[in-house]
Amino acid sequence: MIMQILIVLLLVSSGFFFAVGTLGLIRMPDTYTRMHASTKCDTLGAGLALLAIALYNGISIISVKSILVIVFIWITNPTAAHIIAKSKYNSEKQNSDLKSLE
Amino acid sequence: MKSLSVSHGFYFVLLLGFWLILSQGISIEILFVGSGAAVLIMLYSRSMLYGTEDTSLFQPRKLMFFFKFVLIMLIEILKSNIQVAKIVLSPSLPISPSFVKVKKTFKKDLHKVIYANSVTLTPGTLTVDVDEEGFLVHALTNEAAEGLKDSIIEKSVDHLEVK
Amino acid sequence: MDTVFLATTIFLAVLTFICLYRAYAGPTAADRVVAIDVISTKVAVLIAFLSILTGQESFIDVALVYAMIGFVMTIAVSKYLEKGKLY
């Protein structure tokens, strides 16, 4: 019974954080601030949702695999955000260099 | 090829464990093919796995520090999410974005990666670029930009490096 | 319990379509890459939910592989945007 309440709580909070991330992606004014909202909230939302799946299945191979997906997403999501921000920053810098030359 | 060390064994166990999790059940053939694939992957990506730096994360004492660091990170991630939720849900969007240069560098690439990823996940900051002098960080609010100096993450990564 | 999972799945699917707006309207290419990255994370979680709803255990492997492919895709497109080539 306590487990079920915990699972429902995890699912609802993961839905809340996913919604906040999406709202931030739509509302924020420029690329970097959009990245702030989407990266953080999506990482936590995915972690909570997959934790709920692991708790629902108990001790089984599915739980191990979903924990594996959590670890993978939590390592790769900040890296992906960093590489998008870097490519945006460097291409903007090149463009402003070209403009100052002209 | 270099002689076998502890880190070689660690990578082998890691790759074989991943193979066993993904395969259905355990039999002689599965173990045989998995060990062959693990050795081949280690040979192929040798320069990536154990380059010039020694991998110091594999000592038991370091692992203890690392788990403590992961616990600190989990609390920081929760805090940052609640802060971002507050900012996004407030009608006026109270943000003042700016770029900050953090003059702080670590000897090993592994610690640079850990620091950059942690900064991305902590409240209001996002790592943009890394060079020899330090990290270029984008801050969402002014408080986040000021809180970046002597933060708890920086101290923890220092701790991880020195001990 | 299944209804809660079903409701969360439908909610996530709707959110994924809302993210598609940013991929359509985003003024720069980087905005579109951010939107696609977010969508790929959400779809990986959606596939994991589907494995609960349909009772197919092997779908969780698909979620793992989808998360990996999404990460590689993001890195490839970002590198292409930055340098104009992939290597």
Image: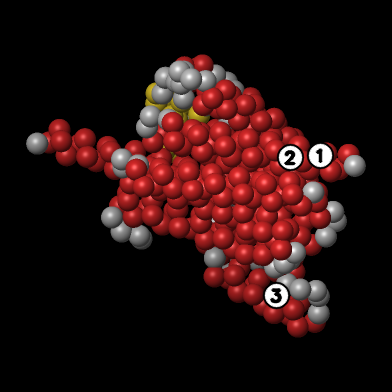
Q: Residue B141: x, y in percent?
A: 47, 20
**Residue C30 appears at what percent x and percent y?**
36, 44
Front disc: 1 or 3:
1
Quadrant placement of the C terminus of chain A: top left
The chain containing the residue under callout 1 comes to A
Subunit of mark 2?
A: A
Write down the chain letter for disc 3: B
Q: Residue at x 81, y 55 (%)?
A: A57
A2 relative position to B133: left or right: right
Q: Element at badge 3?
A: helix
Is B45 located above or below residue A8 in the figure? below
**Near-viewer residue (C58 or B75):** C58
Q: Nearer the viewer, residue B91 or B122?
A: B91
Residue A6 x/y as whole percent = 81, 39
Residue of label 1 = A6
Res. C68 image quadrant: bottom right
Q: Is there one chain holding both mark 2 and mark 1?
A: yes
- Disc on res. A85: none
Confirm or deny contact between disc 1 and disc 3 (CB under 8 A).
Answer: no
Q: Mark 3 points at which residue?
A: B34
Identify which residue, B136 or C39, lies in the foreground: C39
Q: Quadrant of the N terminus of chain A?
A: top right
In the rendered structure, are the residues bearing label 2 and label 1 in contact, judged by CB atoms less than 8 Å apart? yes
How far is disc 2 from disc 1 in space, using C-alphas? Answer: 6 Å
- Determine which quarter of the picture holds residue C31: top left
Badge 2 marks a residue whose secondary structure is helix
